[in-house]
Image: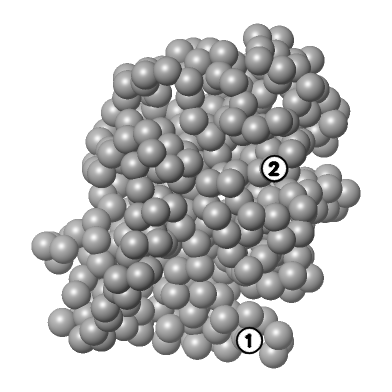
Amino acid sequence: MSIPVSGTISPGWEPVRDVFVANFEAHGEVGAGVSIVHRGECVVDLVGGFTDKSDAVPYSRDTLQLVFSTTKGIAAIALAMLVERGQVDYDDLVVEHWPEFGQHGKEVATISQLVSHQCGLYAVDGPLTLDDALDWNTITARLAATAPRWPIGSAHGYHALTYGWLIGEIIRRVDGRSPGRFVQEEIAGPLGVEMYIGLPSEHEPRVSDVTTQRATTKKSKVDPKVAAMIEKFMGPGTPAHDALSLGGVFGEGAFNQPRVRAAEIPAANGVSNARSLATIYAATMREVNGVRLLSTETRERAAHTVTPENEPDKCLVLGTTFGMGFMTSGPFVPMAGPGSFGHPGAGGSVAFAQPSRDFAFAYVMNAMSANLAGDPRSQDLIKAASSVADSL
């Protein structure tokens, strides 16, 4: 089958296109996009494949894609902008801005601890419905009333969904605007890109639903021991299951529902494209389209790893590394290596910046693989892009 690929690529960056095309056969890609901004110039902006497995509609520049936890990095940028403006500080106590949060001993929590997944709030106390989770006032009130799963600051564990409402409520309390509105008015609008946290209904027809990868000629078998380990650490009743789905509230297919994409879930339901995400991250390092989002000082503070080295993640079991809402380069999420900061999304997407290379990268896709980070499709693209950047 011929795979439609379109877009632009600057001379010398062709190896990235080669990997992008190869991913369709090697990794069962359905539809995807990749974009790179290097030294302030968009050197790669490619889309390819189809919006679904019917192969009826090509994946195009107009296609929008839900990017799961890649959204978290955009929320982290929004908070960092408020820190830069002096409206809030990472060392502030959460209760200084959100008094209701100070229940069950949480009055000692700092914003730094909150956004680096150290507050033990990866789930919500008591029964919860999807309607509850989609209502901003309900879910934030429930989180304020929830007891931490461990003493504040004594450990960290991935707040896969709750992170968004926690950081989002800080943004709302400090700025007065919802996180989705802030991103539109202060990031996407000024840069001339598309990044929605709470998708307007008029853009819904442009969204490519997430699906599964195509079958490939490569045969792979899951080791029964590995399957058993996954079930043990990520099955129902585990911290990972509670964090990743709020105990099953966000079940399979939930994020293909328009009402879920229309809500504001700043941890998981951002809708964008690779070109926009790469542009946003580039603007954290330098002026892009007349806009610079963060100073070097603020960016370096936000991207500094604060979780203890080699500390196991209470939810994901393996070691994870976090700054102020960003994942930072480490064994779990290498990105382009030391100094990289950003965030991956479930199933494969990722967006990040690496200041040492003056390099911003984004990859989005509709075919979900069974991973939370380190997807081979994106890692192969990053490896090719890093090699080209180093040669220039």
Q: Residue at x 78, y 70 (%)?
A: 356
Q: Quadrant of the C terminus?
A: bottom right
Say which amino acid is labelled 2. Ala
Q: Could you tell me how far apart the alpha carbons at marks 2 and 1 are, in whole angstroms?
A: 36 Å
Crowd class of label 2 (few under 14; some 14 to 19; many from 20; radius 10 Å): some
Cβ atoms under marks 2 and 1 closer than 8 Å: no
Q: Sequence-wise, which precedes: disc 2 or disc 1?
A: 2
Percent position of residue 9, x then y: 50, 78
The quarter holding residue 62 reads bottom left
Marks 2, 1: nearer the viewer = 2
Q: Secondary structure at mark 2?
A: loop
Q: Secondary structure at mark 1?
A: helix
Residue holding disc 2:
155
Percent position of residue 82, x then y: 75, 31
Q: Residue at x 27, y 33 (%)?
A: 258
Residue holding disc 1:
387
